[in-house]
Image (cartoon, grey):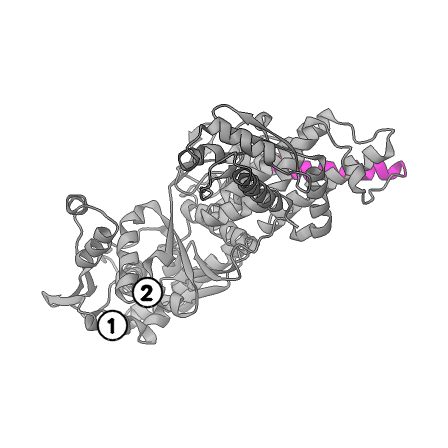
Amino acid sequence: MQTLKTAKTQLKNAVSTAIKTAIDKGELINADIPDFVIETPADRKNGDFATNAAMAGARVFRTAPVKIAQAITSNIELEDTFFERCEVAGPGFINFFYSKDFYASVLKDVEEEKENYGSSDYGQGKNINVEFVSANPTGPMHMGNARGGALGDCLAAVLKKAGYNSYKEFYVNDAGNQIEKFACSLEARYLQLYKDGIEFPEDGYQGLDITDHAKAYADEFGDKLVDIDSSERKKALVDYALPKNISKMQSDMEKYKIHYDKWFFESTLHDSGKVKAVVDLLTEKGLTYEKEGAIWYKNKEVCTDILLKEGKTQDYIDKLELKDDVLIRQNGNPTYFTADIAYHKDKFDRGFETCIDIWGADHHGHVMRMKGAMDAIGYDGSKLVVVLMQLVKLVSGGQVVKMSKRTGKAIQLGDLLEEVPVDSARFLFNTREANTQMDFDLDIAVQQDNQNPVYYVQYAHARICSIIKALAKDGVSPRNCTVDELKLLKESEELELINHIAAFSEEIETAAKEYDPTKITRYVTQTATLFHKFYNACRVKVEDESLMQARLNLCLAVKTVIKNILDMFNIECPESM
């Protein structure tokens, strides 16, 4: 049983029944019960829940809210609920206070559900695709990929906990213009090893990894490519270097504790004819035209129609300066955008009801046109959810760090994972919402004290394990408590902690609804804070055996919540530190 949801349902029904009773008694005029909300007050001293039912009913009952509130409270039955009392406050709010049964029931929930505590059926088993990182395979992964990896992996975990069938995917851009640029860059660096005067492409990839690949090929195969056709030379170099890059990406992700369900290769879309098929489909729908030897997509027309339906004014739309997009270049090659449409179509065709992409904030202009393209080919563009992620800066000693101490080069994901514990990286990258810029403090990430958020949470779990071990030496072992024994927990620190535990499943659902795993990181950090507060205020080992066991049960509940979250995020949950 999810005690918190049950309590809300009980309260909603009790208020509705009280209003009906007041109407039957003639205390309120006969009218339909208006919609009202049950919510948590900003200050829990004012109650555990509050309702605006009296204010919402003022017009229909033609009575002052405070009188309606009095009619409700005088007729409400709380005997079979998790609430012991209620009171009218201010202009007509009604505040409700939990009974001791509520707190006992929460701890029983955790005891019974164990590793499943916090899980929800909110997602109803719907298939949801989470595509993240999808770094260009022509070079090493960077800090943005590190942040996107942690956010994407933890978001997929939250969605799974919320009852979705989440599926993690990495899109490998192993075709198109960037591969041609990669090939030209490799070719130039390779030929420069054997010939003078070889110019490097103006738009080529300047990274040292290109030079390293060219040298590695030369060391292994010598000058066999020097005097052959350029197209053959480039293909040989790409066939040599690209798999190494992809293998490095895969190993870095594994080291980062990210295990994808699928590595999807763009080349398969071209080889299968799906890219051409999507152009044909748009043409059939009258959404393409030819100009200057290229095939264009009527992006401006599609997006304008969507925005007008959303109620946007033409003046607003004009300021966006929408433009049409090229689908097929003059040379007959499809653009990246065309392949991207085909890829997202493929995801929906595989049965995903929602597709989530985590993109860098610099791709914000791409969001509307991709959603519009989905609508254009007959899919629901609103089912494509794009989480935009802001930049991350590495900081050490209060200064921005751009170079790796180990290599002296720009810091890559692999460098970060050699300098910072993986658990720290995964947790810290999930402490700030994706849409906010982030400073990643390298000093904090390696600290083993309470300044490091993941250490702080892990320490709370280890402390509970230590409490249990210490009591075991004295012959005390945790046992299941009766409801009456759990009702002995009445200190404010105890009740505040149980209240927090009760909200775990609701926090999971909210994080899933908002596609924001950082809510759970903050939640578990607050769990640790409230536990430490409880531990400092309430001795666990006391003479009253029943109270001691009740407090042990509370410790075990906190331990379960922390472990469930850290396990969900694939972060170590140590029993000693």
Residue at figure coordinates x 21%, y 51% from the top left:
308
Is 48 positioned to the left or the right of 262 in the image?
right
> Nearer the viewer's eye, disc 2 or disc 1?
2
Task: Provide the residue span drawn in magenta.
Answer: 455-475
Magenta segment includes 457: yes
Residue at figure coordinates x 55%, y 27% from the top left:
88
Farthest bottom residue in view = 272
| Res 361 visible | yes
Q: In this view, does 417 lie above or below 235?
A: above
Q: Name the residue under label 1.
A: 281
Residue neighbourhood size for the residue with mark 2, other residues' Cα within 10 Å, grouped as few (<14), some (14–19), many (≥20): some
Farthest top residue in view = 90
Near-viewer residue (486 or 319): 486
Q: Which amino acid does label 2 sit on?
A: Tyr
- Disc 2 to disc 1: CB gap under 8 Å: no
Near-viewer residue (415 or 15): 15
Q: Is residue 496 above or below residue 574?
A: above
* Quadrant containing the C terminus in the rendered view: top right
Q: Where is residue 327 in the image (x, y as percent from the top left)?
A: 21, 65
In the picture, the disc for residue 379 is: 2
Q: Where is residue 460 in the image (x, y as percent from the top left)?
A: 68, 36
| Res 419 visible | no
Q: Position of residue 261 (x, y in %)?
A: 51, 63
Q: What residue type is labelled 1?
A: Leu
Which one is earlier in the sequence, the residue at label 2 or at label 1? 1
- Label 1 SS: helix
Is 226 positioned to the left or the right of 504 in the image?
left
